[in-house]
Amino acid sequence: MRQVDLCLVLHAHLPYIRHPEVEEHGFEWWFYEAVWEVYAPLLAAFERLEQDAVPFRLTVSISPPLLAMFNDKLLNERLERHLKRLAVLTEKERERTSGTRFEPAATHFYYHVRQALDVYRRYGSNIAAGFRHWQDAGRVEVITAPATHGFLPHLQDNPACAAAQIRVGVESHRRFFGRPPEGMWLSECAYMPAHDGLPGIDELAADAGVRYFFLETHGVTGAMPRPTHGVHAPIRTPAGIAVFGRDPDTSKQVWSATEGYPGDAWYAEHHKDAGHFLSEDQIKPFRPDRTGRIPIGLKYFRVTSKSSSYKQPYIPRMALGRSAYHAQHFLKKRAAQSYGLLSSIRGETPVIVAPYDAELFGHWWHEGPKFIEYVFRKASERSWPFRFAAPSDRLRHPVRHVAVPAASSWGDGGYFKVWMNGTNSDMAPKIAQAGSVMVRDARQFGKTATERRVLAQMGRELLLAQSSDWPFIATTSQGIRPYAAEKVDKFLERFWGLHRALSKHDVSIKSLETLESDDNIFPWLTAAAWKTPEGAPRGRQGAAVITDERMGVRAVEPFLACVWWDLKSMNPGRLRLRLRCLNPPLFEKEIPSTAESGNWYVHQLRPGCSYRLEAFDGDRLVAASKPALLPGRPKTAAPKWKRFRN
């Protein structure tokens, strides 16, 4: 039976915030909150599903900064200390509220904090190890993001800087998860096609071996030529990258401030936190600056009403029931949507992509992880016209529509104004200037071990300054805008200091070691990430693929070609062959390859176009034939691929 592929995607990201110079720093709390409110509850939900033999499949993108924080010893020591403090506080709160109307909420958070601490310890004090476990179990497809979540359209004028963000992101993922990522979450879903002689973001991603990424709805619906099925079928860019568009219906059900599930009256009220009304003695251990009041994550009130400031006590049992109801409602809506797609889309598998910020589930919406758990539980109780899938599952079928996606992002307004406006416009020029110097120094220096260390640390400081979080915070969070500007200036000040020392051959090893200890992200980094590689077809890990004489394409007549291969050194069980047309609009066709050698006739090809046979070991491109030109003139004129211009 035909089914729609339903892809649930959670984007897990935080800016890299690490302050070893002080014992307590308020902004490191973002990391602590994310662990105990979001990621530990999600892993606990996965464990419960597995114990009850409930199948589940979803995609989680873990950005390299968050992955580095998960692996950082100092941050994990501080995180465990924070969780222990919360455990003590919730125990006291359970006793204090005994017999009152707040007892159910206090008891709920008593167990919630202990569950997070248990999950954290169960995975060796490293939450990322939990996601690797479920990746290896085939339940979660873990993908990556650019190195420090850099805003790629603003880096695209210097392709080497944009490429470095992508390559370092891919390598960071590969080193921890033991395999290259199938896909990438573009920072802020921001995309810019090729323009003014500059490569498109899809070309840079393809060069790094990425197979797919996601875009906001209008990035796909506005592609040229227009996709026949909108966001409900992936498109393929001329560079060969598959692109999935966000489904607006699923977003509206969960994200919408007026219609979304998190606004239900029975759910915990995010903005009314216990930290705002507990005694000073109770919250003192949680105040890094030892002044003022801060939210600590305990929610004793429920939404009650969106139009009134009056809030009633939170009742976890009722909120749990609403989570189950909303999960069932979500599935019914997807079923109705799937029946419509199956009747309107013929000849290929429709897809519904539901991407969300992971922090929505647990931080902004306390019941979010339970909602996800209930979605899979309810789905297992009966058959549906859809199946839960990862994007790579959908890519086992051909992607037929080739198009150039439109410039877009999922920020306010749908384009780039959030990251370039009057509040943050001074950031981009400073970062661009440093990027140009980094590319030049990477080519000029690096002959000695000390020079290579300096270049690597310059790269770390530049990458950290390029994070899209700093201009975003400057635009949306007036209260902490100075912190964002301070971070960019600090990273660039360190970058320029290293550059001057390198240029004058006056490097202080002691100062260099201090910077390496403070900004210690990507300890394996080298300046090679900023050196533009030469062309040629590229494999899944970005390495050049050598043209192989053991395979080829031979024209028989204008519409017919014979492909042949003799790859006896490859495992026939993993061997996959694909014939690719190298002329736009691109075309590809799977070739049956049950044996390590053989030949096959391919019909209905376009005359006057070049074709290449490619060999894959699983999903990794390992060899390619020389291009062969079919005789004759093209049956239809190829479209003129215009460069995008401002």
Image (cartoon, grey):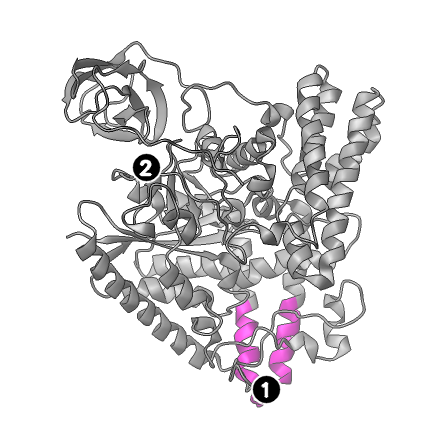
Which residue is under mark 1? 98
Mark 1 or 2: in front is 2
Q: Is residue 30 located in the magenta-colored stretch of the structure?
A: no
Residue 277 position within the rendered picture, expressed as x and y whole percent measured from the top left: 69, 80
- Extreme-top residue of the structure: 549
Residue 537: x and y, percent? 40, 21
Residue 397 relative to residue 527: left or right: left
Q: Is residue 109 magenta?
A: yes
Residue carrying label 2: 402
633 or 460: nearer the eye?
633
Q: Is residue 25 visible?
A: yes
Q: Position of residue 605 (x, y in %)?
A: 19, 25
User: Residue 229 appears at what percent x and percent y?
Assistant: 28, 50
In the image, 577 versus 70, the foreground residue is 577
Q: Main secondary structure of the magenta part?
A: helix
Q: Dividing the picture into quarters, in which one does residue 275 lie? A: bottom right
Above/below status of 24 relative to 554: below
Q: Earlier along the polypeptide chain: callout 1 or callout 2?
A: 1
Q: Give the CA distance from mark 1 to mark 2.
A: 63 Å
**With 540 as the anchor, is 613 left or right in this view?**
left
The relative height of residue 296 versus residue 529 in the rendered view (above or below) is: below
Tag 2 secondary structure:
loop
Amino acid bearing label 2: Val
Please state the extent of the stretch shown in magenta in the rendering. 86-112
Name the residue rendered at 61%, 61% in the picture: 33
- Residue at (73% x, 75% y) in the render: 282
Dot 1 crowding, Cα within 10 Å, few <14, some 14–19, many 20+:
few
